Amino acid sequence: MDKINNDMLVIQVGELIDGISSESKKNISIVISGNSIVDIKPTGELSIPSDLDHKLIDYSDKTILPGLVDSHVHLTGIGDGRSGDELSTLPDEVLSINMANNAKKHLHSGVTTVRDCGAKNDTAFHLRTAAEMGIIDTPRLVLSGRPLAIIGGHLSYFGEQITGVNECRAAVRYLIKQGADFIKVTASGGSTKTSFPLKPSFSQQELNVIVEEAHKFGKHVAAHCHNSEAMVRSLNAGVDTIIHGVFKEPDGTNKYREDITELMLEKNTYVNPTLGPGMMRVQVMENKKQQGNFSEFDQEEMDQILFEHEYRMKCFSKMHESGVPMSAGSDSAWGAYEMGNFFLDIEGHVIGGQTPMQAIQSATSIASKSCWIDDSLGSIETGKLADLIVLDESPINQIENLRTVSEVIKNGEFVDRNNLL
């Protein structure tokens, strides 16, 4: 106990989910000094000198787990159903205010770290500056800044359209100069109107240079992939995380490919499957149907959404069963997926075949590894930073209990969840 000083906090908890063990632990005491975890012991085995100043908190009827790590957000999004093309027409000043609001929503819901996978112009870096100045309260920020896109490609309207290996290299270098923690590349088209979801965007040579340059500076690369060829090119380039991971042929045919999964395993690549958006789209259509005024066209749209969502779930299950590490990431606040609902994506992991414990790990230790921050975050271990959430109910047998957050601790301090400003 010689590492502990007079700012010691001792938390006694009925159940501990540490983010790495296959089973939870009962009646555990966690000792926090400053912003770090310095000791973890069964409550009956922890001895504290009587003359040592400390604060004791009894959560013997609650569950504690690591602060959640959402490995895919777009803080710039609004979540009101508007498209990215519409979103990008808003002034940067409006988007910046919205980003601050979104960050607080996610933090209050138990997400203590976010990886932002693309924002317009320099808004993400301005958000970090405001957080460092204490102007706003946010989760820990892992930022890409502007995503790399081809001309007219997915998210190209956020301000970084590049062509050729020289521009690819220069763009990576400039983003790192600005403070990017990783590089986000849209390796295929997506929802952007001028993009082509079924076609790869960058050439193999361009992707190779992007990854090479990022890795040279110790930064990881995450690639948006909405078709199989984009995944193959990204994996061959050495991309660290495949985002979405949609198995589609050039003609739009759904075809799961074992060879791609084997390549993921060979390359030790993480997959962020973004199951939440599909679940949210289903919910939106179901709500519309319950309200009446549901047309034949609406039913056709709903049938297609359900078909694609079920296919994505099957692909998720096959990748998971093969041993591909799945990193939970909500993709909020894109489309109609509002911030503060990361739970939905984690619940999707359980529906897709993971146990509740595996799904929790996908949103804690595995997500932190995908974000390259697992040396200090993602699990409750001695020496790690004290990012924790307290639940009223255990999620071990009922993953929906992740929604019962009663306290959020970031950096060893309790977050004021009543402060909505």
Image: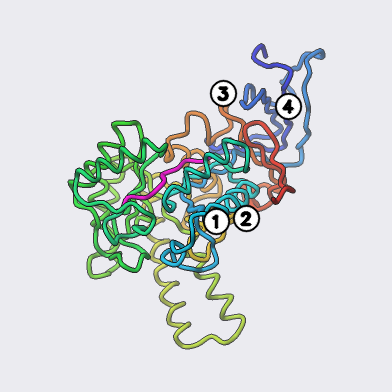
Identify the element where label 2 is drawn: helix
**Mark 1 or mark 2, which is nearer the start of the sequence?**
1
Q: Residues within 10 Å of mark 2 (few under 14, many from 20)?
A: some
Q: In the rendered structure, find residue 347 and report the number of the disc placed on it.
A: 1
Any part of residue 350 in sight: no
| Residue under numbered circle 4 | 10
Q: Residues within 10 Å of mark 1 (few under 14, many from 20)?
A: many
Direction from residue 116 to residue 206 in the image, left or right: left
| Residue under numbered circle 2 | 400
Amino acid at pointer 2: Glu
- The answer to which quarter of the image holds residue 407 is top right
Q: Residue at x 26, y 58 (%)?
A: 151
Of 321 and 10, which appears nearest the observer?
Answer: 10
Q: Residue at x 64, y 50 (%)?
A: 109
Amino acid at pointer 3: Gly
**Mark 1 or mark 4, which is nearer the start of the sequence?**
4
Direction from residue 130 to residue 405 in the image, left or right: right
